[in-house]
Image (cartoon, grey):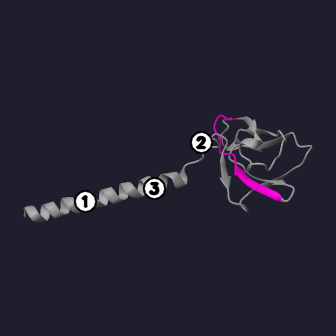
């Protein structure tokens, strides 16, 4: 009787250990970059709801919280989801791929999501 109970306890311990280890390895895959997490999240190409072309005259862009936007600069692009909380304005260079915007200083103005505005 004790042998069966011991085997069950050992199996249970192994299962718990395996699940804990699997969860530990999965967390980094879902974690946002600390530098970008306040500004939203990158999205795979082709999933943008709106496209904004950027050029040397662009000084700002207006987006809405929870909006997904594809930014096009010359022949390059990146897509970003503005799932932000409490970050209404920031520099687009904070989230654009390194070097894509050059020296351009483009401000992002994030309006509140109309779905969550009381009224």
Q: Which residue is drawn at 67% across and 52% down?
A: 42
Along the line of sight, the residue nearer the viewer: 106 or 119: 106
Residue 79 magenta: yes
The segment highlighted magenta reads 76-87
The x, y position of residue 32, in whole percent, is: 58, 47
Earlier-in-chain disc, 3 versus 1: 1
Question: Would residue 7 appear left or right of 70 to someone viewing this image?
Answer: left
The x, y position of residue 101, in whole percent, is: 82, 47
Whether pointer 3 and pointer 2 mark residues with C-beta atoms closer than 8 Å, the reply is: no
Say the numbered circle drawn on residue 51. Answer: none
Per the model, the C-alpha gap separating discs 3 and 1 is 20 Å
According to the picture, the residue beneath numbered tag 1 turns out to be 12
Whether pointer 1 and pointer 2 mark residues with C-beta atoms closer than 8 Å, the reply is: no
Q: What element carries label 1?
A: helix
Question: Would residue 35 appear left or right of 72 to someone viewing this image?
Answer: left
The x, y position of residue 107, in whole percent, is: 80, 38
Earlier-in-chain disc, 1 versus 2: 1
Q: How crowded is mark 2: few (under 14 residues within 10 Å), some or many (20 or more)?
A: few
Q: For the C terminus, which image quadrant?
A: top right
Q: For the N terminus, which image quadrant?
A: bottom left
According to the picture, the residue beneath numbered tag 2 turns out to be 34
The x, y position of residue 74, in whole percent, is: 87, 56
Per the model, the C-alpha gap separating discs 3 and 2 is 18 Å
Q: Is mark 3 on a helix, strand or loop?
A: helix
Q: How crowded is mark 1: few (under 14 residues within 10 Å), some or many (20 or more)?
A: few
Earlier-in-chain disc, 3 versus 2: 3
Q: Residue at x 65, y 43 (%)?
A: 36
Along the line of sight, the residue nearer the viewer: 56 or 47: 56
According to the picture, the residue beneath numbered tag 3 turns out to be 25
Circle 1 or circle 2, nearest the eye: 2
Residue 97 magenta: no
């Amino acid at each position: 009787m004790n042998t069966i109970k011991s085997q069950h306890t050992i199996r249970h311990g192994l299962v718990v250990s395996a699940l804990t280890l699997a969860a530990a390895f999965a967390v980094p895959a879902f974690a946002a970059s600390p530098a970008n997490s306040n500004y939203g999240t990158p999205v795979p190409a082709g999933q943008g709801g709106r496209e904004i072309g950027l050029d040397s005259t662009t000084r700002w862009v207006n987006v809405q919280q929870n909006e997904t936007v594809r930014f096009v600069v010359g022949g390059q692009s990146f897509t970003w989801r503005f799932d932000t909380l409490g970050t209404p304005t920031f520099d687009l260079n904070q989230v654009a791929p390194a070097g894509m915007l050059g020296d351009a200083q483009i401000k992002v103005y994030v309006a509140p999501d109309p779905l969550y505005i009381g009224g």
